[in-house]
């Protein structure tokens, strides 16, 4: 996080909610894996979040059903 700040990073990728507090406190912008998928869809890089998100979860990434539904809603896929 110190390196990100010193390097002037625009964004820090971090999935642990508790750990996200530190870079936010340091004034850094933070997103998680699903945030990257949402941004990729908004920018036209991918057509759908659902398929990729479900594949990531199937590979062992922990996400609650509530989070999954929230992401799909934000993506306009629910």
Image: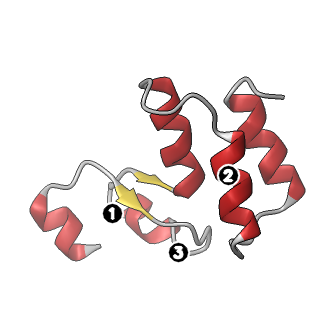
Find the residue positioned furthest to the left: 7
Which of pointers 1 and 2 indicates the residue nearer the eye? 2
For the point 75% across and 36% down, the residue is 72
Measured in 3D between alpha carbons, the distance from the residue under mark 1 to the one under mark 2, in whole angstroms, is 29 Å
Q: Is residue 28 left or right of residue 66?
A: left
Q: Which mark is residue 26?
A: 1
Q: Which one is nearer the viewer's eye here, 60 or 1? A: 60
Q: Position of residue 44 (x, y in %)?
A: 44, 24
Label 3 Cα crowd, 10 Å radius (few <14 / some 14-19 / many 20+): few
Vertical side of 72 occupied by 53: above or below: below
Query: Foreground residue, 62 or 31?
Result: 62
**Rendered-image quadrant of the N terminus:** bottom left
Question: Disc 1, disc 2: CB below 8 Å?
Answer: no
At horizontal 20% and vertical 63% (from top left) the residue drawn is: 5
Q: Gap between marks 2 and 3, in whole Å?
A: 21 Å
Q: Residue at the location (33% across, 55% down)?
A: 28
Q: Earlier in the sequence, mark 1 or mark 2?
A: 1
Identify the residue under disc 3. Answer: 19
Instruction: Name the residue located 36 percent from the left edge and 59 percent from the top edge.
Output: 12
Give me the disc on residue 38: none
Say left or right for 21 vs 5: right
For numbered disc 3, what is the local secondary structure? loop
Q: Position of residue 47 (x, y in %)?
A: 57, 28
The reply to whether callout 2 and callout 3 are in contact (CB within 8 Å) is no
Residue 10, above or below 58:
above
Q: CA distance from mark 1 to mark 3?
A: 12 Å
Q: Is residue 39 above or below residue 37?
A: above
- Residue 66 image offset from top left, x and y in percent: 87, 51
Estimate how packed mark 2 is, as few (under 14), some (14 to 19) or many (20 or more) residues with alpha carbons within 10 Å.
Answer: many
For residue 53, the mark is: 2
What coloring was used for the rendering? secondary structure
């Amino acid at each position: 996080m110190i390196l990100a700040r010193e390097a002037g990073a625009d964004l820090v990728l971090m999935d642990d909610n508790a750990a996200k507090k530190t870079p936010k406190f340091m004034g850094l912008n933070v997103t998680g894996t699903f945030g990257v998928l949402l941004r990729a869809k908004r920018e036209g890089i991918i057509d759908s979040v659902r398929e990729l998100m479900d594949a990531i979860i199937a590979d062992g990434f922990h996400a609650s059903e509530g989070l999954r539904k929230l992401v799909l809603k934000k993506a306009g896929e629910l």
